[in-house]
Image (tube, rainbow, N blue to C red):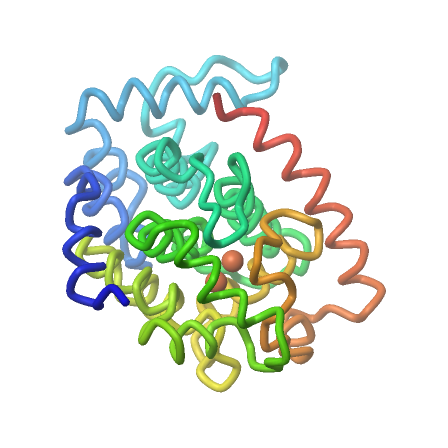
């Protein structure tokens, strides 16, 4: 079986995040960052400035005035969504490939990732709770470890190893990965985000997104609920299926009842279809 060192060696061949994305991520993670400071970081990067303005105008409704300054774009969209969109643009090409070993045909991993990010974005306004902006990016990248493991280990070999999940085993998928591979996609994903110098809370959330006992941080909690909701709306089922440790208290911590969570899932599905159409 391929070693952790070999997996990380492969991960190091992924294109590093642009410097601006790392700086912007640090600012989004810091509550003291001001709009002017964030706009300054974006404006320092001409390519990003053009992208941000294009994106801000593409999502602005026809009735709104054209957005022609980065500062207005930051006010209108929020720095967290700009960061999420920037990183999504960076990873979408690789994430859109099939990962047959994990049971992702076509662009299923990509759709699952975008769905999770959409859920994180919607949670705050839907529940009235304060959601840390870095949760959007953490949700978007939470399964990036599957991409790397899937690329590194051949489809057939990975499929035969992970087929154990569908046999007599009753363990969660992540437990099976650890037992059979020696590492899980959550651990690998966290290591990748650490090498990309993303904020520690993103790294922790990705590492713990399948661990029920270690969800003290609200960002981790948000990623866990985002992952679950993305699956419930049918995006990114894969070989993992619903072999997750489902923490029923997680949705309650965000104030959901059974009924309101069902309504939220329906809303997330609708919103996801709107957002996925904006990626080309
Ligand atoms: Fe996962
Ligand atoms: Fe996931």
- Residue 118 percent across, percent down from the top left: 56, 45
- Residue at 24% of width from left, 41% of height from top? 21
Front residue of 138 and 173: 173
Q: Is residue 137 visible?
A: no
Left or right: 111, with 253 as reference point: left
- Residue at 65% of width from left, 57% of height from top? 229
Front residue of 74 and 236: 236
- Residue 155 percent across, percent down from the top left: 41, 50
Marks counted in the figure total 0
Left or right: 271, with 278 as reference point: right
Left or right: 266, with 109 as reference point: right
Which quarter of the picture shows residue 19?
Answer: top left
- Residue at 31% of width from left, 35% of height from top? 90
173 to 156, vertically: above or below: below
Q: Is residue 233 visible?
A: yes
Front residue of 180 and 4: 180
Which quarter of the picture shows residue 52?
Answer: top left
């Amino acid at each position: 079986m391929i070693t952790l060192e070999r997996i990380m060696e492969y991960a190091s061949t992924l294109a590093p995040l642009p410097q601006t994305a790392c700086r912007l991520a640090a600012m989004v993670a810091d509550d003291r960052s001001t709009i002017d400071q964030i706009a300054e970081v974006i404006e320092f990067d001409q390519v990003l400035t053009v992208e941000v303005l294009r994106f801000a105008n593409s999502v602005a409704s026809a009735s709104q005035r054209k957005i022609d300054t980065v500062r207005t774009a930051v006010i209108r969209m929020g720095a967290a969504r700009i960061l999420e969109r920037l990183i999504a643009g960076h990873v979408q090409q690789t994430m859109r490939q099939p990962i047959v070993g994990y049971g992702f045909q076509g662009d299923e991993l990509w759709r699952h990732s975008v769905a999770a990010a959409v859920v994180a974005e919607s949670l705050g306004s839907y529940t009235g709770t304060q959601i840390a902006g870095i949760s959007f990016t953490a949700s978007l990248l939470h399964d990036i470890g599957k991409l790397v493991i899937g690329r590194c280990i051949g489809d057939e070999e990975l499929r035969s190893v992970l087929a154990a999940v569908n046999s007599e085993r009753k363990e969660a998928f992540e437990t099976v990965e650890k037992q059979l591979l020696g590492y899980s996609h959550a651990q690998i994903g966290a290591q990748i985000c650490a090498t990309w110098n993303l904020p520690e809370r993103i790294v922790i959330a990705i590492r713990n997104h399948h661990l029920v006992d270690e969800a003290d941080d609200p960002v981790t909690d948000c990623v866990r609920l985002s992952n679950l909701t993305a699956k419930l709306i049918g995006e990114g089922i894969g070989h993992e299926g619903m072999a997750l440790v489902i923490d029923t208290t997680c949705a309650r911590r965000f104030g959901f009842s059974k009924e309101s969570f069902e309504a939220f899932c329906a809303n997330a599905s609708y919103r996801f279809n709107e957002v996925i159409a904006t990626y080309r």
